[in-house]
Amino acid sequence: MTELTVVWLPAFMMGLLGSSHCLGMCGGLTVALSSGCEPQKQALLSLVYQLFRIVSYAILGTIVGSLGAVITRWTDFPILLFLAGFLLIMMGLYLMGQWSLLTYLEKQGGRLWKILQPLQKRFLPLRRVSQAIPIGLLWGLLPCGLVYSALAMAAASGGAAQGTVTMLAFGLGTLPALYVTGLFAKQLIHFFRRQVVRSLIGVIFILWGSFQLYNVSSMITNPAGQHTHQHHQTQ
């Protein structure tokens, strides 16, 4: 139970704290999709595409978790943990309105989304569950710096199962804000777009990433601790 908590709790908190970014980037999309639904079906369809967005994250988590386990076996340097900490700091800078590597990564991800976006439009306007499912799955591929940071955490989690759990927890952390926004609270978008709110959460991410990098430096200077960490990851 403790090992599962180590995997999913930080990811869940990342999604929950990162909701300010989610609402800033995807809040308008959430409202647009929900407003296109029939009122009596709105709650159901919103829940379906949000849940399948999370399923999409989980599939990505399985993939990167598997790749991360292979990379970990190739080197004694905790490169994936370093990357996770670094991207947390980048996420914090991004939320604070400063330049971040995540801006560049989102632009690169945007190239893939240009290919997929016409496919998503085939399922609009949203009227049925059969439309909500593919919309949710495709939504998981939207270029998003927060998702990239979570994927780095999933890659460093130790394996396919841990990567899956990491991204499931992350997705569930983002669910309350996006689901509620789609149904009731368009005002939340304006609140979370306020720079003071984003900056405060950005500082939390920077401190979190700095602590992660401190742990990496401790593992480098204390190889026994690194082996212990890897042993826990492989259990």
Image: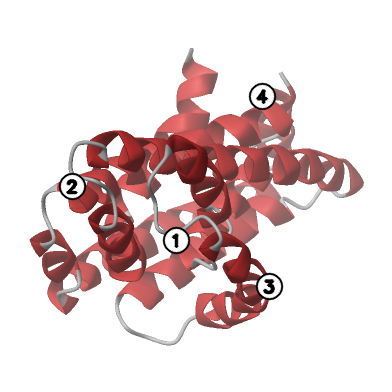
Residue found at x 80% / y 45%: 67
Tag 1 residue: 210
First-in-chain label (1 vs 2): 2
- Find residue 120 and report its horizontal and vertical position in percent: 55, 61
Q: Is residue 86 above or below residue 1?
A: below
Asked whether residue 168 appears in the rendered view, the answer is yes
The colour style of the image is secondary structure
Tag 3 residue: 115
Q: Is residue 192 above or below residue 63?
A: below
Tag 2 residue: 183
Residue found at x 13% / y 70%: 190
Residue 119 or residue 93, whichever sits in front? 119
Residue 120 or residue 74, whichever sits in front? 120
First-in-chain label (3 vs 1): 3
Label 1, label 2: how many angstroms apart (C-alpha)?
A: 36 Å
* Mark 2: secondary structure: helix
Label 3, label 2: how many angstroms apart (C-alpha)?
A: 29 Å
Tag 2: residue type?
Answer: Leu
Tag 4 residue: 232
Tag 4: residue type?
Answer: His
Asked whether residue 217 appears in the rendered view, the answer is no
Label 4, label 2: how many angstroms apart (C-alpha)?
A: 41 Å
Tag 1: residue type?
Answer: Ser
First-in-chain label (3 vs 2): 3
